[in-house]
Amino acid sequence: MQQKSNIIRFIIALILCEGAGIVGSLFTVSAIKDWYVNLNKLFFSPPNWLFGPAWTLFYFLMALALYWIWQKGLSNKSVLFAFWIFIVQLAVNAIWSVLFFGLRSPILGLVDIVVMWLLIVYNIYLFYKIDKKAGLILIPYWLWVTFVAMLNFAVWQLNLE
């Protein structure tokens, strides 16, 4: 029975995390073709095709971290708090695509990604205190968001009108 509930938790964590990516992609795909492609970007900006696989990997790592924390039991107040901070940062993550691509607003995207970055740092701290591997596995995601924040800033600066 325990193994079945663990599998269900993992599936829910995976659906939550990858679902955030799917929501974001709904706003991203069309904007890449007719808006983002025409923006001035840094010379080392990755090709557009790389972002989908990269985000898919990071959402998977996030799902693992959430699953490992969830296994500690949501009846524990510190686990429950860390769980909800994760959900908030995941929502802020999904909102970034709406702001940056959907509204085509690099400045709103930048504000959002700074909040996301701070929430990820806090999440890493909270998760690490509960389960070291759950905190550590979020570090590549944090590094990726740091890189994307730099790209977001550059797009904003290079396309000021």
Image (tube, rainbow, N blue to C red):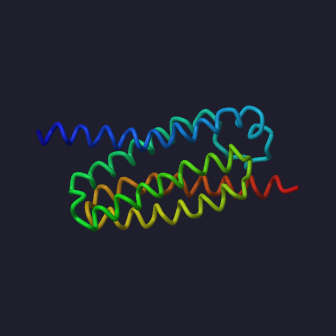
Q: Quadrant of the N terminus?
A: top left
Residue found at the far left of this picture: 1
Q: In the rendered view, tell whether residue 94 sits above or below residue 149.
A: above
| Residue 31: x %, y % from top left | 71, 37
Query: Within the image, what quadrant is residue 29 found in?
Result: top right
How many marks on residues? Answer: 0
Image quarter where the C terminus lies is bottom right
Identify the image quadrant of residue 135.
Answer: bottom left
- Give the x, y percent position of residue 44: 68, 46
Residue visible at 41% across and 43% down? 16
For the point 57% across and 41% down, the residue is 24
In this view, the residue farthest toward the front is: 75
Q: Residue at x 40, y 55 (%)?
A: 138
Q: Position of residue 112 (x, y in %)?
A: 61, 59
Residue at horizontal 60 percent and vertical 35 percent from the top: 26
Is 44 on the left or on the right of 12, as rendered? Answer: right
Question: In the displayed structure, does residue 25 sit left or right of residue 17?
Answer: right
